[in-house]
Image (spheres, rainbow, N blue to C red):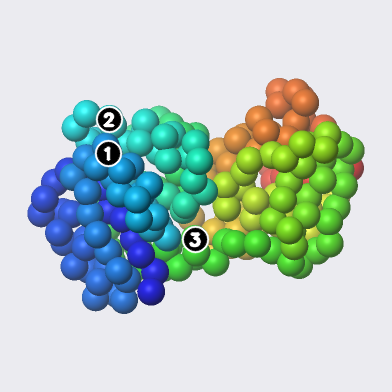
Amino acid sequence: MTAVLVIEDDDRIRLALLLALEEEGYTAYGAGTAEEGLRRQRETPADNVLIDLMLPGIDGFECIRQLRRDDDVPIVVVSARDDTHDIVAALEAGADDYLVKPVAVKELSARLRALRRRGRSTAVPAQVFGDLEISPEAGEVRRAGRPVAVTRTEFRLLCELAEHAGRVLSRQQLLRRVWGYDTGDERLVDVHVGRLRQKIEPDPTKPRHLVTLRGLGYKLQR
């Protein structure tokens, strides 16, 4: 059974989320602070983590960063903060998705299912783009022979672009193929592309492989 860790300091909201997730068939457990959540994830790793941004002590942004140091668990931010800066900052910290409170349980469950489907891809054999090697079957990315640490979502995005190497994929196409959404916030794509460039491009400001076609989308080129 899929386990979900809910890091939320409001007792009523945390309890409501836990009960709703259990009704959807998840094993759910909670933490009232980032510190407690980080400890629980180290001791009993969950399959998904939900994080509020406004937490006492360590805030949600730092909690995401600390989780990302050694864990590729799918992370969904569930927050009342809907400012563009906050959304982008949370995604840049390493979150996979962002939902604004109040959250519809069915939508949250659908997002979690989509996140868990983003494991290894075996659709294409290993491909080389200059010094960048993508091995979908092995679940590995290497640059100049050295492993590159990427999250599940970053890896799935890279594999999708590699499968269509040289072809432009629109943001909506990538949202559908990588996130599983018919419609959604295109900032999810832009921020994850930016994070990937930091990891795979010699000069992220002048990308050689993961390029933008203004007004069209992105493509991966050799």
Q: State left or right for residue 41 relative to residue 180.
A: left
Q: Is residue 55 above or below residue 165?
A: above
Residue at 14% x, 46% y is 10
Q: State left or right for residue 124 relative to residue 94.
A: right
- Residue 154: x and y in percent read 61, 47
- Please tell me which residue lies in front, 208 or 212: 208
Q: Separation of disc 2 and disc 1 at Cα?
A: 6 Å
Residue at 21% x, 63% y is 18
Secondary structure of residue under mark 1:
helix
Disc on res. 58: 2
Whichever of labels 3 and 1 marks the residue nearer the N terminus, that label is 1
- Residue 72: x and y in percent read 52, 48
Q: Which residue is mark 1?
A: 34
- Residue 31: x and y in percent read 22, 48
Asked if one can make out residue 89 in the rendered structure from this viewpoint, the answer is yes
Kindly report which numbered mark, 2 or 3, lies closer to the viewer in this rendering.
2
- Please tell me which residue lies in front, 50 or 145: 145
Q: Separation of disc 3 and disc 1 at Cα?
A: 22 Å
Q: State left or right for residue 89 relative to residue 140.
A: left
Disc on res. 115: 3
Q: Are marks 2 and 1 in contact (CB under 8 Å)?
A: yes
